[in-house]
Image (spheres, rainbow, N blue to C red):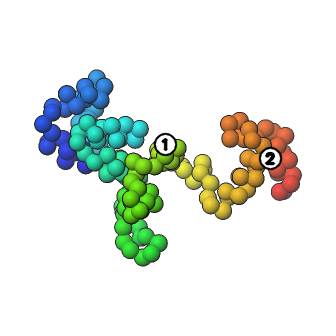
């Protein structure tokens, strides 16, 4: 998407880079060629400066980071319709009900960025089935979210479940 937008720009790459506080315009060129990834935390800002739809550009940046993009783009909706990752994400965000990706809360955007940036998200993120156990642990040990479990608590869990 960035590659297609650059030739259509009335501003030079240098002036766009300057507006984005990049020291060199080659960064944008490298992003357009896919040699470096578009930073997710700046994707909407880059899109706005370049006059690209911010929601679509963020989705393209997320898709760029997905190693199995060909699988995601061929995924199905739960109701049987065909659609890609972008459309699935937009549906989840509530596009059909008038909400867009830009309407996600900052926490939701931060979590999406973290998931996409994580090399092995399955090691870090909980499944729906695991969630009740984690909620219970957080109630019992509120500090777990920031400090983790101490050795005593870990041993107690192993003993209880072992």
Give the mark, 1 or 2, whose residue is nearer the N terminus. Answer: 1
| Residue under the point 30% across and 38% down | 46
State the residue position of label 2. 140
| Residue under the point 28% across and 40% down | 48
Give the x, y percent position of residue 71: 40, 63
Vertically, is 149 above or below 82? above
Give the x, y percent position of residue 158: 82, 51
Question: Left of 160 or right of it: where is 145?
Answer: left
Q: Is residue 141 visible?
A: yes
Q: How many marks?
A: 2
What element does badge 1 sit on? Answer: helix
Name the disc covering residue 106, or none: 1
Give the x, y percent position of residue 116: 46, 48
What element does badge 2 sit on? Answer: helix
Label 1 packing within 10 angstroms: few (<14), some (14-19), many (20+): few
Q: Could you say which is closer to the camera, residue 84 or residue 19? A: 19
| Residue under the point 14% across and 43% down | 8
| Residue under the point 49% across and 46% down | 105
Q: Could you say which is closer to the camera, residue 16 or residue 28? A: 16
């Amino acid at each position: 998407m960035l590659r297609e937008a650059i030739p259509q720009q009335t501003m030079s790459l240098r002036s766009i880079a300057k507006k984005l506080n990049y020291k060199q315009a080659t960064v944008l060129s490298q992003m357009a060629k896919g040699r470096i990834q578009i930073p997710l935390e700046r994707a909407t800002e880059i899109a706005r400066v370049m006059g690209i739809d911010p929601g679509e550009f963020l989705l393209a940046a997320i898709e760029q980071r997905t190693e199995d993009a060909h699988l995601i783009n061929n995924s199905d909706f739960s109701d049987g319709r065909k659609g890609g990752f972008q459309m699935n994400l937009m549906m989840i965000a509530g596009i059909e009900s008038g909400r867009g990706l830009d309407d996600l809360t900052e926490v939701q955007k931060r979590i999406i960025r973290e998931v996409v940036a994580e090399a092995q998200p399955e090691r870090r993120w909980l499944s729906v089935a695991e969630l009740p156990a984690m909620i219970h642990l957080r109630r019992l040990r509120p500090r777990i979210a920031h400090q983790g479990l101490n050795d005593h608590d870990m041993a107690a869990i192993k003993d209880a479940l072992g």
